Amino acid sequence: MAIGGTMLGKLGEKLRKSIKKLAKMPIVDEKVVKEVIKDLQRALIQADVNVKLVFKLSKSIEKRALKEEPPKGITPKEHVIKIVYEELTKLLGKKSYKLKIDKKPYKILFVGLQGSGKTTTVAKLAHYLRLKGYNSAVVCTDTWRTAAYDQLKQLTEEINVPMYGDPNEDNPIRLAKEGLNKFKNYDVILFDTAGRHKNEKELLDEMEMLSKEINPDEIILVIDGTIGQQAKSQAKAFSERVKIGSIIVTKLDGSAKGGGALSAVSEVGAPIKFIGTGEKIDDLEEFDPARFMSRLLGMGDIKSLIEKFERVVEEEDKISETVDTMLSGKFTLKDLKTQFETMKKMGPLKQILNMLPLAGNIPKNFSKITEDKIKKYCVIMDSMTEEELENPRIIKYSRVKRIARGAGVRNEDVRELLRYYKTTKKALKGFERRKLGGPIQSILKQIMR
Ligand SMILES: Nc1nc2c(ncn2[C@@H]2O[C@H](COP(=O)(O)OP(=O)(O)OP(=O)(O)O)[C@@H](O)[C@H]2O)c(=O)[nH]1
């Protein structure tokens, strides 16, 4: 499911809007920073993010945006975008934590209130684990809700995962013991539990007893994302009685309060390892705060953009030299080849372009070329001689024919590449270095590297 679509839809939209606004500002000063912070505050509070957290975030953004110097090669605007992104990400946790199956059987105890999506999540995780190559089995210990057994049975049958339970048994401990014994040769055993009891205390008592009996390798708390920041007190109640190892927040699809739930749960101390994004069996996603935020912000992969910026800074001198050569008109097919090879290494061109918040400013010649073309052109250049690459002017008809044959393409393809080269060279000549604005220059540098 696309986050940009329904999931936390409104929050994402609003955050995107304020970042776009920032990206459009001619300069970034205190007034602009404050305005952006106001927008962010409004969006976050509407998504039920705790006011204190929002306040903390505002302070850090303001302080960093106004005090920190942007690194060389990065414009103040890009710098502020990066700070906003980093601070928003921090709301969701410091890093990503993966589920590690490091012994056999790996026992997972699921806890959570009724309706949180626990049973569905157990099945989703069993399915996820199977795709990762682990064979897992499921035990139903819920003796309170009679439909729980049937629901789990149906879900596990659909995915062909063995399940143990007994609708006539009223002792969850006995069910857990039996299940443990039955599935001890499996890679992973998932224990589903009750979500309802006479009262909350007794539910927690039962979880504690089950935990003692099963001695799980990990206890996963399942929390309904639609409850917003209340998720924190719920998580706390459970963690006071059993050792919560990780959390899964469900129903983030279409929940306006998802941001509140995620940020609140991040404060509890146990990492969010997965999120539930729908009712279907594969609507379970590994949770990575940085990736999640960059997707939510809908600006392509900001994380990789930032890493690239870091490389830009490191390679500033080297790039500067290359750009100088290109802009001075000494642009050979060899330079074009280097440029293509970098593009190939950096991933699909489309992706690179999407990563740039200001992609609209890229000269047409650069954005028009497709990945397939790049591949083809590289093959063609591979069958050229060093001399031809250095001095493309010598490539006349007989050479075109030889190159085409060598590369297994039509003569017309070779001529097309030569035309592309000429246009690019001309376009580069048209740029006067001093006329290039900051961001355009760094984009050009990225592309030309
Ligand atoms: N939209 C959406 N619905 C979900 C998600 N996860 C679970 N649900 C739905 O939430 C409802 C409750 O889920 P269950 O798995 O039955 O809840 P439970 O926590 O196991 O309830 P107990 O068995 O009583 O503890 C079901 O209708 C699920 O389909 C999710 O990520 N997104």
Image (tube, rainbow, N blue to C red):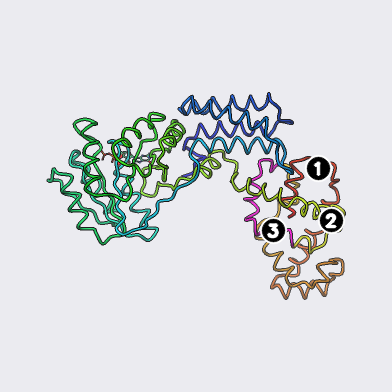
Label 3 within 8 A of ligand 1 by Cβ = no
Q: CA distance from mark 2 to mark 1?
A: 16 Å
Name the spot of residue 209 as percent of width and height, x first.
21, 42
Between 135 and 277, which is closer to the camera in this rendering?
A: 135
Disc number placed over residue 325 in the picture, else none? 2
Membership of 350 in magenta stretch: yes
Q: Quadrant of residue 418?
A: bottom right
Label 2 within 8 A of ligand 1 by Cβ = no
Between 110 and 22, which is closer to the camera in this rendering?
A: 110
Number of marks present in the image shown: 3
Residue type marked 1: Leu
Q: Secondary structure at mark 2?
A: helix
Residue type marked 3: Thr
Magenta residues, as a range?
Answer: 338-360
Q: Quadrant of the C terminus?
A: bottom right
Q: Which residue position is annotated with label 3?
A: 342
For the question of whether residue 277 can be seen, the reply is no
Residue at the image point whose x is 74% and y is 44% from the top: 73
Question: Magenta part mainly helix, strand or loop?
Answer: helix
Would residue 333 be found to the left or right of residue 53 on screen? right
Q: Which residue position is annotated with label 1?
A: 436
Q: Secondary structure at mark 1?
A: loop
Would residue 398 be found to the left or right of residue 449 on screen? right
Residue type marked 2: Thr
Q: Earlier in the sequence, mark 2 or mark 1?
A: 2
Q: Earlier in the sequence, mark 1 or mark 3?
A: 3
Q: Secondary structure at mark 3?
A: helix
Membership of 348 in magenta stretch: yes
Compared to residue 206, the image places residue 406 above or below, namely below
